[in-house]
Image: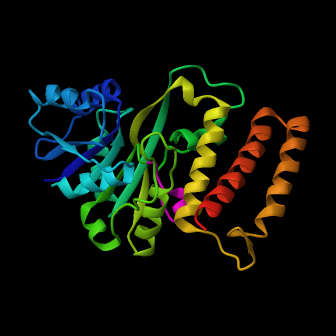
Amino acid sequence: MDASIIVCTYNRAESLRDTLRALHALKSSANRHWEVIVVDNNSSDHTRAVVEEAQRDWPLLRYAFEIQQGLSHARNHGIACARGEVLLFTDDDVLPEPDWLEITLEGLEKYLADACGGYIAPIWEAPPPAWLTARFYGFLAVRTDRTDDYPIESSSQAPFGANMAIKKAVFDKVGLFDTNRGRKGKLLASGEDGEMFERILAAGHRAVFLGQSRVHHKVEAFRLTKRYFRRWRFQTSRNIAQSRGMAGDRRLFNIPLYVFPQLLRAIVRMLWGHLTQPRDEAFNREIIVFHFLGLIQGLYCAR
């Protein structure tokens, strides 16, 4: 089989229904063989019923259940189930364009690449506030900064899980997704995609960004608030500290001493920014403070 599309889902049955409709409408060449695997990550809603309804006229759609909570657990389950040579990942709030599958597979073949990511456009449930400029799109798994093809050369360029593909053989060499990272239920965290691509690149594999491999990502209104961004940054940074730690020998409560003056400087910059800077820059400085607070709590809890 050429490809397996893996959709991990948690308590988003109606949004998943939209995603499955978009996937069912994908166009591919006549000799292309592919499947879709929905990994239900212990949902308590009617997710299974939605998948079973779609399966009635779609034999290539498969259902899997992963009881261990966490996006990385669900993805690893999907990888184990997949029969395709290339594994394409997307989410239960994403609508791929009809040519997404074909363009992604052709791009991997064209550039002799082992992994790739692509363009992610937002579907705003409500108009974004003035402070929410493109600099914050990464918090929402939106990527619209470039539309060309280019090599991915560092983990900072790693794609988002809403639109990425990796050859299955790569996982045999670099391992699966780190289950200490990533979203778990309602706990916001990330970093598993970047860490995976860090391993992929370190192993000498080629990765590319495909500007015409496109999906559309729903952005709910509740995510367009400063409260959500603060929570996302705090919980993600806490997860990073707990999973990776930080360098430094001189410590207080397991926190390197140099972190404290960095936090103090960040607070001063935040306060000054709220008085002197545009709204997006002022809030960006506030987000940096929440990054340090998350790191500190993560390190303290890991002591």
Residue 97 image point, x, y percent: 34, 33
130 left or right of 26? right
Here the colouring is rainbow
- Residue at image position (71%, 26%) is 130
- Residue at image position (44%, 60%) is 180
Residue 176 image point, x, y percent: 33, 64
Residue 97 included in the magenta stretch of the image? no
- Residue 1 vs 302, above or below: the answer is above
112 left or right of 209? left
- Residue at image position (79%, 33%) is 279
Q: Between 185 and 218, which is closer to the camera in this rendering?
A: 185
Asked if one can make out residue 84 in the rendered structure from this viewpoint, the answer is no
- Residue at image position (85%, 56%) is 264
Residue 269 image point, x, y percent: 86, 49
Which stretch appears magenta? 151-160
Q: Quadrant of the C terminus?
A: bottom right
38 left or right of 57? right
Q: Between 267 and 19, which is closer to the camera in this rendering?
A: 267
Residue farthest to the bottom, as pictured: 249
Q: Between 175 and 128, which is closer to the camera in this rendering?
A: 175
Q: Between 10 and 280, which is closer to the camera in this rendering?
A: 10
